[in-house]
Amino acid sequence: MNRKPSIDIHTLKKQHTQAAPPGNQAHPLMKQLEALLTREFSLFGKPFPDKIKESFYLELGSLMDAGLDIRTALQLIRDEQTKKAPRAILSAVLEKVINGSSLSTALRENKSFTPYEYFTIEIGEETGKLNTVLQQLSVYYQSKIRQRRQIIGALTYPIIVLSVAFCSVFFMMNYVVPMFADVFRRFGGNLPFLTRQVLLLSHFMQAAAGKLFLLLLTAIVFISISRSKPWYKKYKDLLLQKMPVIKNIVSKIYLARFASTMQLLLGARVPLVQALGLSKQVMGFYPLETALEQMEQDILKGLPLHESMSSKNIFPSKMVALVKVGEEVNELELFFKNLSDRYSGDLDYQTTQLSKFIEPVIIIVLGLVVGVVLIAMYLPMFNMGNTIR
């Protein structure tokens, strides 16, 4: 009688963590802040977020590689899950599998999983490469999470500095400058132009503080309500494409995601037209989704993939050239993998450089603002001293 191997699911997670590429070393406090900002909260987000999907596919593929059947593997993963919502989802999937459904069918009937996931898993089941597809899905979500963390990590420090700067200026304008204004009124006389402008700004901020706070609160509520609406996503993405520096980074993020998605789908032997359609559903970036929709129609009309891509502004000429070579040698999967690695590397470099550039700029601007306010307040003092002499 064959015994099933003993599997420690925590060992799998540890090995996965050790295998992950090391990021830039940062101060422990900054790491904690980045972790907080990049954490996915089920209360406001998905009940089965990308981080859990990454672990789920990694563990399921590893357990099945170790010889466990899919029911036992799912049960083991479900039992290890401590959060209520993911545990309920895994229980529903497990129940359907026990009742005779395939894994792809069980995922298809659950709203927490995308067509991209259950379609590729279905192809893996049909071709006998389910374990490979599961591992590739884990790598895909790992890459997706890393890209998001790169951006948030690069912006964490600047956001903190900007917040402190805003609070400092607000405090000076509402409490420090009015104290100087009382002194100037007692002494009388004409004030320098710079001082008058700072005092006017201080009066405006005092009068409009409540309205500004209400406006900010309204904007936050509006964005929270509208962020899931298609029209909001459309205009947000179009706006990002027009912002200097940011547009290049955003484009690299989604081009890397597109390339890794196509690599996985083509590796699972998904037909090209269906691969484009599935990629469109998981992009989450309006300009690229529109381009992929048009590319589907072009492929159905008989155009090669590279020709269809060349007519879309979102795809760089180098990417189109590599895809053309991939089509000619019938190795599109390999070339999309190379493109994914290239754009991920570019993204690492650009986010690091952006962070290095933004930090000193913010500090310089903050110093200039504080310096201007101080000079404006002390100029009348110097004039008074000269008058007394």
Image (spheres, grey):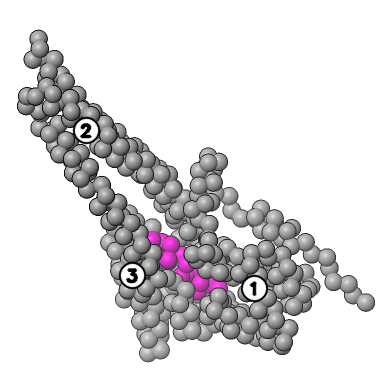
Please tell me whether mark 3 sits on a helix, a strand or a loop. Answer: helix
Residue 131 on image: x %, y %: 68, 74
Residue 347 on image: x %, y %: 44, 56
Please tell me whether mark 1 sits on a helix, a strand or a loop. Answer: helix
Amino acid at pointer 3: Tyr
| Residue farthest to the left, as pictured | 190
**Main secondary structure of the magenta stretch:** helix
First of labels 1, 2 by sequence position: 1
Q: Quadrant of residue 101?
A: bottom right
Quadrant in which the N terminus appears: bottom right
Identity of the residue drawn at 56% across and 76% down: 113
Amino acid at pointer 2: Pro
Quadrant in which the C terminus appears: top left
Amino acid at pointer 1: Ala
Within-10-Å neighbours for mark 1: few <14, some 14–19, many 20+: some
Q: Nearer the viewer, residue 64 or 341?
A: 64
Q: Which residues are magenta?
A: 250-264
Label drawn at residue 178: 2
Residue for badge 3: 232
Identity of the residue drawn at 38% across and 58% down: 249
Identity of the residue drawn at 46% across and 84% down: 273
Distance of label 2 from label 3 (alpha carbons): 41 Å
Residue for badge 1: 88
Left or right: 190 in relation to 81: left
